Amino acid sequence: MNAHTPIDRDISSCRFVLATDLDGTFLGGTEDQRRTLYDWIEENRQTVGLIFVTGRDPKFIVELCEDGLPWPEYVVGDVGTTIARVLHGAIDPIDALEEEIAEAWNDSGDRVRDALQGAPGLTLQPTAFRYRVSYDMDPEAFDRATAERVEEMGLDWIASDAKFFDVLPPGISKGPSIKRLVSHLGISPNQVLCAGDTLNDLSMLECGLPAVAVGGSEAALVDRVAPLHHTYIAKARGAAGILEAVRHFDLHETP
């Protein structure tokens, strides 16, 4: 286990809490830029809290952190359908926050897979997610009627980065889930920075918390969030874009 696994503490006591997407955001930028961000987090663990808000599943996150990535204290994973605490290298769902997600999903996995079997442009991902169904997407072959079929089933969908298609419980995504977690933990909204780079981060960047679309973000995401006064469009990519936004919002001293 990484020696920097966070201690058991009240994260609301931190001066600043980073709630960040992984691919293209926390994992984005050059190796030097990532190391600068990660070292800064570890050096300031008494005042900086860390939450991963990602489409990745808990197993993938644990493997990343065991390989040296800073450990988060909480995870909003699976595009917002997992809300969990991280302690001593384990990711444990918070039942009180996931009950609503499970109820909204209503065991729809088999129903979705049957309905979208053979849908043009979609290839089912092999991971058995609990409260979502995810596909790799070929945007040129994708048929808009597939999205309409999902809507007719009473479920939500997100197409992101021109290569992913996620079917989600109604009303559940990264934004609502991070807001519920922040409220549950008693964190002041002004202490939080949400960071992302693709359309599956849209609800998180729109949710009203201070936010950044890092450099190199999906153009469709930038177009949607550019008018929002609480969302900053960074010039630097990935990890460097996160630190650029921390300075912009004056959330914490930075390197």
Image (cartoon, rainbow, N blue to C red):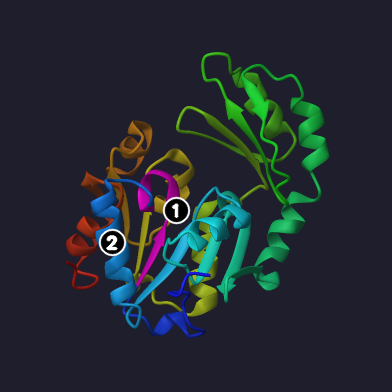
Residue 48: image tag: none
Q: Position of residue 188 (x, y in %)?
A: 39, 76
Residue under circle 2?
37
* Distance Cα–Cα, label 1 vs label 2: 21 Å
Image point (26%, 46%), residue name: 30
Quarter of the image that includes the C terminus: bottom left
**Residue 241 seen in the figure:** no
- Judging depth in this view, the residue of 41 and 112 nearest the camera is 41
**Residue 32 seen in the figure:** yes
Q: Amino acid at mark 2?
A: Leu
Judged left or right of residue 255, residue 52 is right
Q: Position of residue 189 (x, y in %)?
A: 38, 71
- Judging depth in this view, the residue of 34 and 252 nearest the camera is 34
Q: Is residue 218 above or below residue 28?
A: above
Judged left or right of residue 35, residue 154 is right
Q: Amino acid at mark 1?
A: Met
Residue 204: image tag: 1
Q: Position of residue 250 (x, y in %)?
A: 19, 68
Image point (33%, 39%), residue name: 217
Residue range (magenta): 17-26
Q: Is residue 63 above or below residue 109?
A: below
- Was residue 124 drawn as part of the magenta stretch in this picture? no
Secondary structure at badge 2 equals helix
Q: Is residue 18 above or below residue 211?
A: below
Judged left or right of residue 22, residue 217 is left
- Was residue 21 drawn as part of the magenta stretch in this picture? yes
Judged left or right of residue 216, residue 84 is right
Q: Position of residue 10 (x, y in %)?
A: 47, 85
To which quarter of the image does residue 75 belong? bottom right
Label tally: 2
